[in-house]
Image: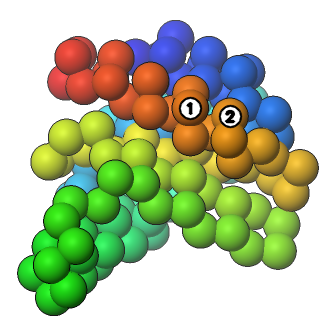
Amino acid sequence: MLSDLTQLVSDVDGAWAAAIGGLDGLLVEGYTPTNTDLNLLVAEHAGMVRSATSVYTQTIGGGQPRELYVRGETLSVFLQPINDLFFLLLAMDGRSNLGQARLYTREAARKLGEQL
């Protein structure tokens, strides 16, 4: 799994971290060449994934969310569900390429889903 995460970070322009998180907020595996606390990133974004899933499936009837993208001033995060229990997080900077993030994260999630 670590090699898939490492490859994802190198494939996406502007990416600086990738992690597999559980919807319980726990980090399963992660990679970053920085000193960022991936436990914190996963824990905070797990709540967003749970909330989005609840709103889309129960409140507005939009079905399961397929992806979630949050963009701040200096940080953006792309979240891709792997299965009902895990998600893939890709953290990027301001020069990130969302198209690459969507393409490569979807493929990485498929591969990782086979391993989980």
Residue found at x 19% / y 24%: 116
Q: Is 97 placed left or right of 80 in the picture?
A: right
- At which x and y percent is residue 17? 64, 39
CA neighbours of label 1 inside 10 A, class few (<14), some (14 to 19), many (20+): few
Nearer-the-camera pick, 102 or 49: 102
**How far apart in space, not on screen, are marks 2 and 1 (Cα)?**
5 Å
Q: Is residue 105 above or below residue 21?
A: above
From the viewer's perspective, tell me whether residue 25 is left or right of residue 84: right
User: In the current view of this chain or complex, which residue is farthest to the right?
Assistant: 95
Type of amino acid under label 1: Leu
Q: What kind of element bears circle 2? A: helix
- Which residue is farthest bottom? 59
One can see residue 21 in this view: no
Between 65 and 83, the one nearer to me in the picture:
65
Identified at 48% across, 38% down, the residue is: 19
Pointer 2 residue: 100
Q: SS class of the residue under badge 1?
A: helix
The single residue placed furthest to the front in the displayed view is 62
Is residue 39 left or right of 70 when viewed as pictured? left
Q: How is the image coloured?
A: rainbow
Give the residue number, with chain letter if any, for mark 1: 103
Give the image quarter of residue 12: top right
At 16% from the left and 47% from the top, the residue drawn is 85
Across and down, in percent, residue 89 comes to 49, 46
Q: Is residue 95 above or below residue 15?
A: below
For image coordinates 21% across by 60% down, the residue present is 64
Residue 113 appears in the rendering: yes
For the residue carrying disc 2, how many other residues have a C-alpha within 10 Å: few (<14), some (14-19), or many (20+)? some
Give coordinates of residue 54: x percent, y percent. 18, 77
Give the amino acid at mark 2: Gln
Tag 2 and tag 1, C-beta contact below 8 Å? yes
